[in-house]
Image (cartoon, rainbow, N blue to C red):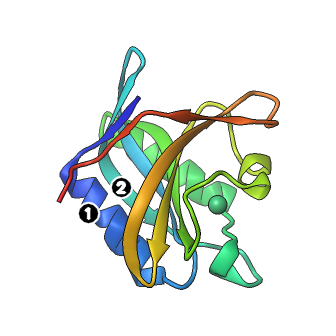
Amino acid sequence: MIEIEREPWEKMVAHARATYPNECVGAMLGVVDGGRKVVREAMPLENSFAGEQSARYELRPEDLLSADREARRRSLDLVGIYHSHPDCGAYFSDTDLKNSCPWYSFVVLSIRKGDFDHANSWLPNAEQTAAEKEELIWPKS
Ligand SMILES: [Zn+2]
């Protein structure tokens, strides 16, 4: 399961609303305690996809590396990646699966008409053929 603390959660939602109707993407920094991940900080990154960004995001490998370095500098781990789905559900698309890494949690935020609607977290398998839903806890209201 993955739990997101209030401060990073509010940052993620604000980021997703700010980039609407385009997808946002960012890194989640936190700690792993057995099967439980706690997100302490969110780090907005740039969606580097060159085409239409309303249904697609791309991350530069160097941005992911610097997020990882930043996590370690703060004695945290890079536990996952978040991105938004403007005006559609928080499912894990085939493209999301293709661009995933099995060691991260992938949180998808559904933004409808510019406002937060719901979210899911996904754990891709090593073959990148399927993603299992992970229990996700975020601060309500
Ligand atoms: Zn997606």
How crowded pointer 1 is (Cα within 10 Å; few <14, some 14-19, many 20+) is rated as: some
Q: Residue at x 70, y 71 (%)?
A: 56
**x and y percentages locating residue 48 in the rendered image:** 66, 74
The residue nearer to you, when weighing 80 against 74, is 80
- From the viewer's perspective, is residue 7 above or below residue 135? below
> If the picture is divided into quarters, which one holds ligand 1?
bottom right
- From the viewer's perspective, is residue 139 above or below residue 24? above
How crowded pointer 2 is (Cα within 10 Å; few <14, some 14-19, many 20+) is rated as: many
Horizontal arrangement in the rendering, residue 121 relative to residue 37 (left or right) = right
Q: Mark 2 or 1, which is nearer the eye?
A: 1
Q: Residue at x 48, y 48 (%)?
A: 120
- Helix or strand or loop: what does disc 1 sit on? helix
The three-letter amino acid code for the residue at tag 2 is Ala
**x and y percentages locating residue 78 in the rendered image:** 46, 40
- Helix or strand or loop: what does disc 2 sit on? strand
Q: Picture quarter containing residue 46?
A: bottom right
The residue nearer to you, when weighing 48 against 119, is 119
Horizontal arrangement in the rendering, residue 40 relative to residue 122 (left or right) = left
Give the spatial CA distance, label 2 vs label 1: 9 Å
Residue 42 bears which disc, if any? 2
Residue 10 bears which disc, if any? 1
- From the viewer's perspective, is residue 76 above or below residue 7? above
Q: Residue at x 38, y 44 (%)?
A: 29
The three-letter amino acid code for the residue at tag 1 is Glu
**x and y percentages locating residue 99 in the rendered image:** 75, 51
Q: Quadrant of the C terminus?
A: bottom left
- From the viewer's perspective, is residue 139 above or below residue 130? below
Horizontal arrangement in the rendering, residue 123 relative to residue 45 (left or right) = right
Ranked by sequence position, the earlier of labels 2 and 1 is: 1
